[in-house]
Image (cartoon, rainbow, N blue to C red):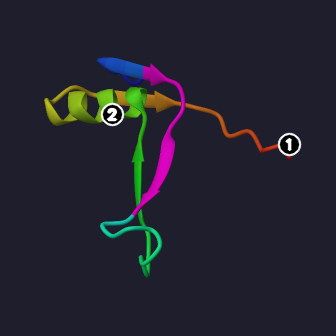
Amino acid sequence: MMHFDLIGLGECMAELFSDQPLEVAKDLKKAYGGDVLNTLVHAARLGLRTAFISKYLPLSF
């Protein structure tokens, strides 16, 4: 059985952004975040063993 110091349950956010105004941007950059994921990343950087539990649900619209 694996041992984790911190387990997060939640959602991961994907964000698209540009360094330029969107009207003139030629491309978008991708990043991931969300409060649960950000907390786990920072805890892992401090040396804790972390895990992330989430579920993908297809959109209904």
- Residue corresponding to mark 2: 38
Image point (33%, 34%), residue name: 38
**How far across and how far down the image is residue 28, in percent?**
44, 69
Which amino acid type is marked by label 2? Asn
Image point (22%, 32%), residue name: 42
Write the start and end of the magenta stretch as one range.
8-17
Side of 53 where 30 appears, left or right: left
Quarter of the picture containing the N terminus is top left
Looking at this view, name the residue that lies furthest to the right. Answer: 61
Image point (31%, 27%), residue name: 39
Q: Which mark is residue 35?
A: none
**Count of numbered circles on the image:** 2
Determine contact: label 1, label 2, CB under 8 Å: no
Considering depth in this image, is 49 or 23 the residue closer to the camera?
A: 23
Side of 42 where 61 appears, left or right: right
Image point (42%, 76%), residue name: 25
Looking at this view, name the residue that lies furthest to the left. Answer: 46
Q: N-terminal of the two: label 1 or label 2?
A: 2
Quadrant in the rendering for residue 7: top left
Q: Is residue 23 above or below residue 2?
A: below
Q: Secondary structure at mark 2?
A: helix
- Residue corresponding to mark 1: 60
Q: How busy is the neighbourhood of tag 1: few (under 14 within 10 Å), some, or many (20 plus)? A: few
Q: How busy is the neighbourhood of tag 2: few (under 14 within 10 Å), some, or many (20 plus)? A: few
**How far across and how far down the image is residue 2, in percent?**
39, 24
**Can residue 49 be found in the magenta stretch?**
no
For the residues labelled 1 and 2, the Cα–Cα distance comes to 27 Å
Which amino acid type is marked by label 1? Ser
